[in-house]
Amino acid sequence: NAGVTQTPKFQVLKTGQSMTLQCAQDMNHEYMSWYRQDPGMGLRLIHYSVGAGITDQGEVPNGYNVSRSTTEDFPLRLLSAAPSQTSVYFCASSAGGVWGGFPEQYFGPGTRLTVT
Amino acid sequence: QQQVKQSPQSLIVQKGGISIINCAYENTAFDYFPWYQQFPGKGPALLIAIRPDVSEKKEGRFTISFNKSAKQFSLHIMDSQPGDSATYFCAASSYSGAGSYQLTFGKGTKLSVIP
């Protein structure tokens, strides 16, 4: 099992450019999410998905789009990059929710994005 | 509105000492409290977690203490080692239906264990 993989590892964009951060998991997890990590801010939820075809917004969704066409993949799209989106982005996945049990969230290695 | 407050921001502990990190939450609907450990350049990884029906959970040198009435929980690392040097995040979550668990994270504590 590769677990949660993210590409690219590093990316530099100019303001206004668009790009897609890729996330894939091979654990057949239903739940996937995207976080951004900024110094002193912890991890903040951008978007999440509870299964293929279902997505919802997290705490900081503005400027980002997601879609979930397969169980394995959950790409994050930056529509028009801004310097405020300079951050480290983490994708995470977990098994579907079962009442009485909390599935562990597995994080990918992250993508470090710089917007100039 | 910050729903999970974590302190301190940074912590320096001598090897063999006890590291203590504290978190407080506001949302009484939270029913799951994990701690994540993150090494530089890596993604966070689950360290230990607790549900509010117990007051303490211990796994090796790591212990979570939970105080439901005070809405506080803490991580204790006994016999701290240089290899424990990392950033630690507390988090809280509640099951919101349809398999959806949203984790709310604290801002993190950078722990440095010096030899």
Image (spheres, coloured by chain):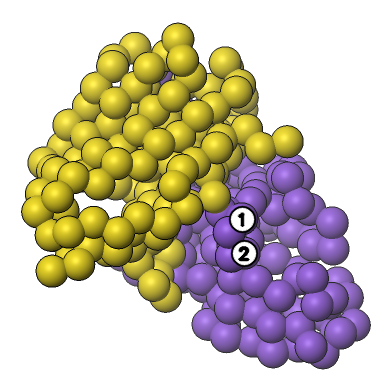
Secondary structure at numbered mark 2: strand
Placement of B97 over or under A115, stated as above or below: above
Please give the chain letter of the residue carrying mark 1: A
State the image coordinates of residue B90 (x, y, percent, origin top left): 44, 41
Q: Quadrant of residue A91?
A: bottom right
Chain B image colour: yellow
The answer to whether residue B33 is left or right of residue A59 is: left
Residue A53 seen: no
The answer to whether residue B111 is left or right of residue B81 is: right
Secondary structure at numbered mark 1: loop
State the mark number for residue A38: 2
State the image coordinates of residue B55 (x, y, percent, origin top left): 28, 16
Quadrant into which the N terminus of chain B falls: top right
Query: What residue is at 28 percent from the left and 31 percent from the top?
Result: B64
In the rendered image, what is the letter of the chain coloured purple? A
State the mark number for residue A41: 1
Q: Quadrant of residue A58?
A: top right
Q: Nearer the viewer, residue B48 or A49?
A: B48
Q: Quadrant of residue A99?
A: top left
Q: Are marks 1 and 2 on the same chain?
A: yes
Query: What residue is at 45 percent from the left and 10 percent from the top?
Result: B69
Amino acid of disc 2: Asp
State the image coordinates of residue B114 (x, y, percent, origin top left): 20, 67
Placement of A72 over or under A81, stated as above or below: above
State the mark number for residue B77: none
State the image coordinates of residue A51 (x, y, percent, origin top left): 61, 44
Placement of A105 over or under B68, stated as above or below: below
